[in-house]
Image (tube, rainbow, N blue to C red):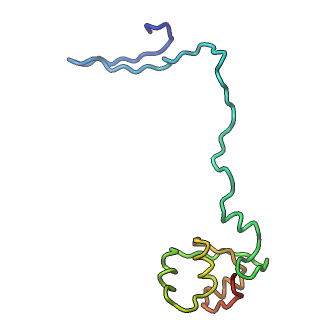
Amino acid sequence: MDNGLTAIVAEVPRESKEPLRAKFGAKSIRYTERAIVSDRVTRLWSSRNELVKRLLANKCELCDSTDNIQVHHIRKLKDIQRHYCGRPNPPEWVIRQIELRRKTLVVSGECHRCIHAGIYDGPKLT
């Protein structure tokens, strides 16, 4: 190369146009005293997400039980907001999910069964 660097240059000639050039290794590899070398490995995930923290607490968010912890999941938060909008007494699990603004709720097996059966009448969440 013209500036004294070593590189591989691939050139494809074309009619009535400049040739196509690809340069490989055209960057300087000279020693620099002030260069900062960073050998840190970047972490893809900085910390555990909120659901994992809630699961690791191993406690039902409705009744504080530690037996058979499961996750209740709904498709869309908007669905339960629309379904229970204007009703005088929505179930406590609905209120909790709307307050948390989450589609998941960590519950005990018994609470989960009652939620799906439509008979959950647990303690008030205040």
User: Is 124 or 65 nearer to us in this picture?
Assistant: 124
The relative height of residue 53 versus residue 65 in the rendered view (above or below) is above
At horizontal 48% and vertical 14% (from top left) the residue drawn is: 7
Q: Who's the residue at 51% across and 18% down the image?
A: 27
Judge from the rendering whether residue 89 lies leftward or rightward of residue 7; answer left or right: right
Q: Position of residue 60 (x, y in %)?
A: 73, 77
Q: Position of residue 49 (x, y in %)?
A: 66, 59
Up/down of 75 relative to 21, above or below: below
Left or right position of 12 against 78: left
Residue 16: image location, x then y, percent: 20, 17
Position of the C terminus, as image quadrant, is bottom right
Q: Identify the residue at image location x=66%, y=44%.
A: 43
Residue farthest right in this picture: 66
The location of residue 59, given as percent across then percent down, is 76, 74
Q: Vertical placement of 44 versus 3: above or below?
A: below
Residue found 65% across the figure and 18% down from its top: 34
